Amino acid sequence: MNRFRKRRTGDDRKTRIRRLLLRDGRKLEPYERKAIRRFLKDKEDLREVYSFKESVHRLYRTKGKKRARKALIKNLDLMTQSTLPEEVFAEDDLSLAK
């Protein structure tokens, strides 16, 4: 998420939106969610990456093996239907594997 945001908006580590985008959406205050919606309004690609990040957070909270399997398959299907290049999803996976 953060790498994609840097490419889109630049690498300013002091921006408040950076911290908001990386936090779990459930832990945000309503005014913070509104700020994220406003920021992502005209940035479709970044909005899509943000929604994938949130779906992964939901996946981590899923209880039960069957439910988690269904959620994972749903997330993977959504990622394959995405208009974003594959590198967006692959680069984070590769860095975690090292």
Image (cartoon, helix red, strand yellow):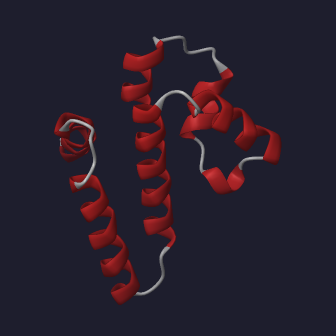
x and y, in percent, of residue 40 in the image: 57, 32
The residue at 80%/47% (across/down) is 30
The relative height of residue 35 versus residue 76 in the rendered view (above or below) is: above
Q: Quadrant of residue 73?
A: bottom left
In-image side of 39 versus 33 (left or right): left
Q: Quadrant of residue 12?
A: top right
Q: How many marks?
A: 0
Please tell me which residue lies in front, 3 or 94.
3
x and y, in percent, of residue 47 in the image: 48, 38
Residue 1 seen in render:
no
In-image side of 98 versus 51 (left or right): left
The residue at 67%/57% (across/down) is 26
- The quarter in which the N terminus is drawn is top left
In-image side of 82 versus 19 (left or right): left
The relative height of residue 45 versus residue 66 in the rendered view (above or below) is: above
- The quarter in which the C terminus is drawn is top left
The relative height of residue 9 versus residue 44 in the rendered view (above or below) is: above
The residue at 65%/38% (across/down) is 37
x and y, in percent, of residue 38 in the image: 67, 31
Residue 75 seen in render:
yes
